[in-house]
Image (cartoon, coloured by chain):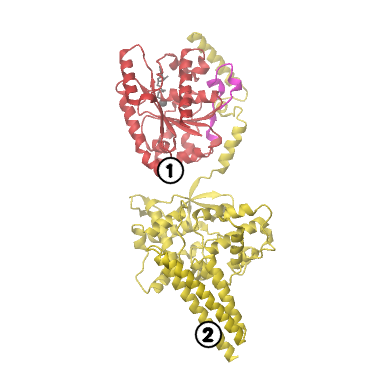
Amino acid sequence: MSSRERRRKIQDEENLLYANPNTLDPKTADAIGFGLGELAMEIAAADSEYQAIEAINIQDIQPNAMQPRHSVPHDLTDIYPLTPDNIVDIFERWIIEVQLEKSQNDFDVTNYLLGETTERGERAEKDESDGSSGIALAASTKEDALMKLVDLAASIRRDGLSNPISLVQDGDRYEIETGERRWLAYHMLYWRFGDGDARPDGSRVNWSRIPARLVNRVDVWRQASENNARDNLNAISRARQLAVLLMDLHGWQNFTAYKECENEQAFYAQVADGARWRIPRGQGERLLNAMGMTEASQLRQYRALLRLPEELWRKGDDENLSEGELRKMKSALATVTRVTKSSAGKRKKDVVGRLAVDAGQWRKRLRKEISSTTVDTRPKLRRLIEGEIRQLLRLMTELDESEATVHSA
Amino acid sequence: MKIITLLNEKGGVGKTTVATHIAAGLAIRGKRVILVDADPQGHATIAFGLTKEPGFYDLIVRNAPFQQVLRPVPPERFNLPDEAHNTRGQLLMVPSNIETRSIAGNISDAFTVLKRFNQLRNAIDFVIFDTSPTPSLLHSSIYMATDGIIYPTKCEAWSFDGLRESLTHKDQFSPIRQQYNLNDIKVLGVVPTMYRGRTLEHQDNLRRLQDIFGELVWKPLPVRTIWAEVASARRTVFSLAPTTTTADDAWSLVDQLEGRIYEQS
Ligand SMILES: Nc1ncnc2c1ncn2[C@@H]1O[C@H](COP(=O)(O)OP(=O)(O)O)[C@@H](O)[C@H]1O
Ligand SMILES: [Mg+2]
């Protein structure tokens, strides 16, 4: 075919392409789906999953009350509920409490925010992003909890936020699906550096806006998988997580709304009864996976935590106590309570004996831990011991008090 | 999904020609292919007679949905004349216009392009990037996304400089990619284009190229006047002149690419 013939043929084809009534102009001609079929559906599906990342004003964001992990100690949220307006008050109060705890009155977070990262900071960062943190949770004080947040904020200031938070839009406000701690870290940076901070690398940032992905609704299973991926939920948070998933499986209409419950524990305790709120048939595997557990017995143990006495629940959450420790304390506390109620001397003796056994077992465990301790785990061990001593002393005082009441009665 | 990029920091070496024909060839053979025009000049977009808006910028910066940006190339433009109506694969295009130049200044991180195309990981077999000769931050983002690179080059002595530059740039991304657990970028081939086999100069230069790159050097694409006609007809050579030796040359590009990819995996 000669060049001229080809040209003529092309012209004919062009005429045909555009002569189609559906393709009146070139723009619509090339925009029409030329039989994309199934592929068009797959592309549409990919589009519907994709959420653009937007910068959202941190003041327009509310935490999700049901988020299992609490990053602010209960003592503080008792006074100031966790809302955007209260956050600066919370930070200020928190610092005062840490100063009291340390008997040091010049404690300030700004230096930490400006400074190089600490080892703890790198850990905090891992917790937030890649989930590879295998470090066991240590018993925590208000300082520890605060510094975790400070370190996260410092790492965000230095390296930026690699993992946007996820939000659900509600009118002109937003609710957090995942990322409460990252949001608090932004608040801290905004509180300290405002909206024109010069980062160590020279770029300027406005901390009043946080990168976020908008999702359609809070998906408790997605929340769970995010939380698990990071492997850093304490026992109480895991119990909350389990409760929320159970409620989701049974249908939310069966439960009293969070806001109408007496306190946060009461909300989760609605599914404490394992006989009434069984794991629905065929859902066990899914639940175990979502909780990052392997044995059904673990589900039972964590469910049992929902019935902890309120003070243990709070203590366990603030101090990151393990499920085993909490179980032991619960039984010790129950014994003490029984003692205070009974006036029979013999029974009291039994109980004291049981407490002694308890303490003996504890000593054995300690001995084992001490023999395997290294420089790295020593602070953890120290806190473990201190925690236990404090606990035993308290039990003793309660025992004393109970005797006093028995005598005076 | 495999992401393949055509690169050379020189213009007029045949990047767009190779990109359009590889994309078309794979689609004719049944693959689902996206050709991304990442050159503000939009030559690949013109080569298939598509309008230039919305384009790559809309996809990456304005976060336009794929449905809005991806444009099907009519099979009449790329498939053999008698087979256009039962084309087995799909050829979609992300057009480009002058706004593409501003993408570099508006992307937040080097993973933007990768993240975006990963959305289609299960729907698409190949994404082919046709790039501009001027390096920019957009190139970095493409370096973080691509699995393999094809370097078209002319057989003239000075062409090899651009090639060497491009290869050094590729190597600069290895440590970053490693850090993020991405495989190293594979050099899929060096394609000698506009080859004049009768001239001693080209023969010499081809030999030099083979000395440096060995097996990576593909069969040369001979210089032919029909290529100019192909571009102005908004067709591929498969569609315009399916029985010519130039069509055979183009098929051989597709064959060699498929060969490299199978030997890869
Ligand atoms: N093998 C070839 N023989 C002759 N002309 C060619 C050949 N390959 C490409 N061309 C022509 O050279 C010009 C530049 O090619 P192009 O593919 O646009 O290069 P680039 O994208 O690298 O700028 C185009 O007009 C094209 O038609
Ligand atoms: Mg080009």
Seen at 32% across and 31% down, the residue is B165
Q: In this view, does A378 lie above or below B31?
A: below
Is residue B179 visible in the rendered image? The answer is: yes
Q: Quadrant of ligand 2?
A: top left
- Foreground: A344 or A242? A344
Q: Which chain carries label 1?
A: B
Q: Find disc 2 in the rendering and name its residue.
A: A400
Q: Is residue A336 above or below residue A371?
A: below
Q: Is residue A16 magenta?
A: no
Q: In this view, does A330 lie above or below A163?
A: below
Q: Which chain is red in the picture?
A: B
Seen at 51% across and 60% down, the residue is A233
Q: How far is mark 1 from mark 2, CA to CA?
A: 61 Å
Q: Where is residue A186 in the image (x, y as percent from the top left)?
A: 44, 57
Residue range (magenta) = B68-89
Direction from residue B189 to residue A226 in the image, left or right: right
Direction from residue B180 to residue A34 in the image, left or right: right
- Foreground: B83 or B66? B83
Q: In the image, what residue type sits under mark 1?
A: Asn
- Foreground: A398 or A60? A398
Q: Position of residue A187 (x, y in %)?
A: 44, 59
Q: In the image, what residue type sits under mark 2?
A: Asp
Q: Find disc 1 in the rendering and name its residue.
A: B181
Looking at the rendered structure, the secondary structure element under dot 2 is helix
- Res. B150 mark: none
Display colour for chain A: yellow
- Foreground: A325 or A76? A325
Task: Write down the quadrant of residue A190 in the picture.
Answer: bottom left
